[in-house]
Amino acid sequence: MSASDETDRDRSARDDILARVARATEGVRDDDPDAAYAALPRAYREADDLTPTARLDRFEQRLVDYGVDVVRSRPDEVPERLIAELARRRAHRVVLPRGLPPAWRLRLRELQPVADDADPLDLDGAHATVSECDVAIAETGTIVLSGGPGQGRRAASLVPDLLLCVVPASRLVGTVPEATRRLQARVVAGAALTWISGPSATSDIELVRVAGVHGPRRLLVLLVTDGPPGA
Amino acid sequence: MTRIPLPYHQAASEALGDAQQRANLRTVTGHIRAKRAQVTSELPDWEALREAGERIKDHVLRNLGSYLPRLEERVTAAGGTVHWARDAAEANGIVRRLVAATGEREVVKVKSMTTDEIGLNEALAEDGVVAIETDLAELIVQLAEEEPSHILVPAIHKNRAEIRALFLRAFELDPSELSDDPRALTAAARRFLRARFLDARVGISGANVAVAETGTVGVVESEGNGRMCTTLPDTLITVMGIEKLVPAWRDVEVLLQLLPRSATAERMNPYTSFWTGVHDGDGPEAFHLVLLDAGRSRTLADDVGRATLRCIRCSACLNVCPVYERVGGHAYGSVYPGPIGAILNPQLRDVKRDRELPYASTLCGACYDVCPVRIDIPSILVELRRRVVTQRRREAPLGVPSLEDAALRAAAATFASRRRYEAAQRLLRMGQRPFVRRGGGAGGTGATDGGGDVLRSLPGPLAGWSAVRDLRPLPRRSFRDWWRDRSRS
């Protein structure tokens, strides 16, 4: 079968389906779909009404609910915190994505770094990945990676067993709609997004929740604030 | 899926005899119901979100003819290839050719209703290609050579001992190496599947959403197998129903608030992946999106049925359904069970067997109350029942009405006139005498005329009905008689 046969078949399937859809929506479709779309009701909340402190607390509480380890840190303490948390978890081979702040890199150079574009098999041999994030959502305890600086390829935050994600308070928003607004430009630019809410989990066997199926079994969030370090 | 399912009434009555399954279902659905109620009530704008979800999906369905080409254009511009499939066979053919072109004999799959619907695994098997299900429950069901029984927890009909036995055989483990602790079982599946993920060259997925504005496709999951399948292989093939579209990126904010809370009753599911075509140096080098019609455009043409296509496959309606809770998923004979299956299957498949499904409901309305996109399932069920009756009339030999039809017409005539109604009461009061058992009713209060009397073992076609129900006989004196006597005195 030649490639052009295949194109013909697909082409006629396309035309058929679009013709069926046109017939099916006769009399109910809008003359100007974009204008009709703009007029759709959106009475849901865009933002929360929390203070920044309360929002941070909510984020932390949501993460804890998911079984995430949360550590608070001041900006200048981040490299020390990173090395301490990694050492405590005996993570030596660590994936360090491109674009991480040079100060962190410098402090982490005593570890065995793995490049974020390494082969999946090499990533499988790493103990942990250190990553930044694009935006985080307090209401749902979600971290969004978009492949930006310090975030690495998607496989880098997926294959190793521990993900250590640094979340500055400035990246935290209250609600999902605030997050999608912030991410709009990244999506339009063609970025791939990963939304992470806790470690991977399953309840497939007798509804018993087991953390750590295929993604990282453990997730640690380093919450960076200017205030005094919390517990 | 090649097995021909039993008629619903037979499958349901078999399932009702399975005490283990009923107990499992009761626990699972009860648990999820309570959690769902809690996480939806903590959002003050839950009803506004439902309304937005309903309106966005309605809008996209009415304007599908504009949005589908837009999606195609954006996916193509981002380096993906879009394929169109009129039916299941065409979709399977496309995927088979794509897999054959890679020369691979093994593909990794992330749980997808749509690929189950079209029977993709069986189609690939014809080419000697093994499709490995990577969702834990789907893997269990696949290894057991069974079918899923629930949209979200497809293996709830299996207990840990059965799963251990399956894994011992499939992973070739020594019994001493594996306990029946869910953690140990999960870890065994992780080891087995990780080797496959790292080797995989072809991944196959469904899609929870596609964004027309940007060409972005999204998959919502918990375990990380979805991320593995959509990022590690060189080639990614996604099969998606044409109704899974939203117009713009911001609509994702509605879906991602409605879906996880309705589905697993979580504030957010652990992982959601969004990709747009192919990404340089990150993830698959080739992305194919197969857009599937398979009955959807026909459903779209139906003013009543159209709302069915708003469904986001959350399974909240299963978890609240008193019928599903008792008969389980297999009885529905489709990958789409429960209330949504009862309206989706008869419309998508148009097969005779599905004519029983609109009756698999008490019309209690709980499914409508929880539906995140406000599908009025009870009204659609009633409409589908009307169509079944009309169809049956049309097919009746020589136009002879069925017994049920005749009885209901007679009842309608009786209830329409006081004279006929009272005459019928007199007639029934005499006619019931041989069937009344004195004082046999459980919990008779004695407050009503006749005390605890019950009607048992009615004759003819009513026998089946009275065999499982205690029916009160008509009282010796009706309310109307009493009222008349009282007014006279």
Image (spheres, coloured by chain):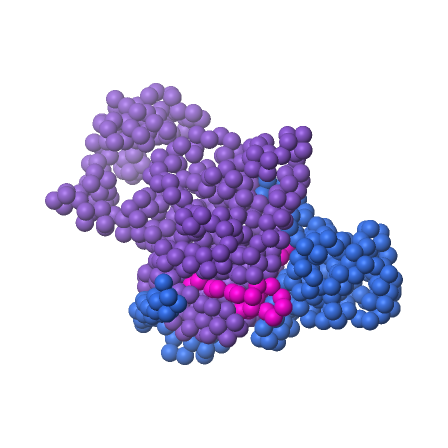
Chain colours: A blue, B purple
Displayed quadrant of residue B231: bottom right
Residue B56 in sight in this render: no
Residue B39, position as x, y percentages in the image: 61, 53
Residue A209, position as x, y percentages in the image: 65, 44
Task: Judge by depth and name the residue closer to the eye, B38 or B190.
Answer: B190
Q: Residue at x 72, y 71 (%)?
A: A149
A28 above or below B97? below
Task: Check the image and name the residue furthest to the left.
Answer: B398
Report the span colored magenta: B266-291
Question: In the figure, is residue A41 to the left or right of B300?
Answer: right
Q: Residue at x 53, y 36 (%)?
A: B158
Residue B270, position as x, y percentages in the image: 63, 55
The reply to whether the magenta stretch includes residue B286 is yes
Task: Judge by depth and name the residue closer to the eye, A125 or B372.
Answer: A125
Q: Residue at x 52, y 52 (%)?
A: B107
Residue B126, position as x, y percentages in the image: 41, 48
Task: Judge by depth and name the residue closer to the eye, A141 or A210.
Answer: A210
Task: Judge by depth and name the residue closer to the eye, B113 or A115.
Answer: A115
Please state, as top left, top right, bottom left or bottom right, where the N terminus of chain B lies in the image: top left
B214 above or below B171? below
Q: Residue at x 49, y 71 (%)?
A: B75
